[in-house]
Image (cartoon, rainbow, N blue to C red):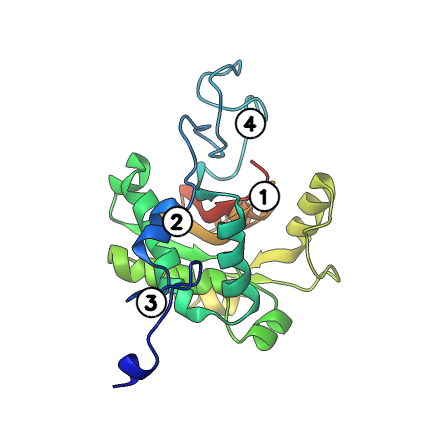
Amino acid sequence: MLSWLFPSTCELCGETADLTICPDCLRKLPRIPVPVCLHCGAPTAGLQVDADRCDHCSGHARPFAMARQALRQSEEAMQLIYAFKYHGALHLARPLAGLLHELWEKTPRLARHSDWLLVPVPVTLQKLYTRGYNQAGELARHLATMRGLRYAELLERRDTGVLSQTRLTARARRLNAMRAYHLKPPGFFSRHRSFPSRLVLVDDVFTTGATARACATQLRKLPGVKEVVSLSLVRIGT
């Protein structure tokens, strides 16, 4: 009766739909085109010096083994991100996690193993209190259910006095991220004896990779962890 009186509508087109994003709008969201850099996931034109990596990644060591993003930046993708992240649209968590699930199926390095542990990028306690949820945590939780995997909140974000990294330069982003992201206190890990050797860091957006690098650096400190992969919903900038 409630569904009949108050039918759900698509977040993008406004048409009545069974899902909060209708199938047509989901299909139209721009995916990352191939070929991509095998490290950071950036689209490449095939003209770079290194056949497997973009010029930005070639010759540089990274603490994460691979980064992949589901969508290119677009007006529609950012509309969904803003609604989900800043306007309490938790109903978008499942369809957005479905896009990560789709990307997972198309990424052999992820699909060939079944022992991944999903780790969401954390937010500060202040943002958690204000929003009431961590958007990356919601994505990780739904994706874990879809994949039949576990997820664990192993990281914390400390308040560095910078409200958002959006307007920082690339160098400032790196420095701020390294100060902000840390493993949870030792007492938390004393209750967890071991972790899978493969971890997937889940986030909503990927811009310069500063957050992924800082979080992966921390996760690599855990005993037995051999590989950290970054998985994000939208790639900003390219």
| Residue 144 horizontal/vertical position (percent) | 31, 59
Left or right, residue 108 beside residue 49: left
Check disc 1 and give the amino acid type: Thr
| Residue 142 horizontal/vertical position (percent) | 34, 62
Instruction: Say which residue appears at 68% left-offset and 51% top-offset.
Output: 166
**Distance (Cα) linking label 4 and label 1:** 14 Å
Residue that carries the numbered disc 1 in the rendered image: 207
Check disc 3 and give the amino acid type: Thr
Nearer the observer, 75 or 150: 75
Label whose residue precedes the other's in the sequence (4 or 2)? 4
Residue that carries the numbered disc 4 in the rendered image: 57
Q: Secondary structure at mark 2?
A: strand
Check disc 2 and give the amino acid type: Leu
Label whose residue precedes the other's in the sequence (1 or 2)? 2
Label whose residue precedes the other's in the sequence (2 or 3)? 3
Is label 4 or label 1 in front? 1
Q: Secondary structure at mark 4?
A: loop
Residue that carries the numbered disc 3 in the rendered image: 16
**Distance (Cα) linking label 1 and label 2:** 20 Å
Nearer the observer, 167 or 149: 167
**Distance (Cα) linking label 4 and label 3:** 44 Å
Residue that carries the numbered disc 2 in the rendered image: 199
Instruction: Say which residue appears at 44% left-offset and 28% top-offset.
Output: 36
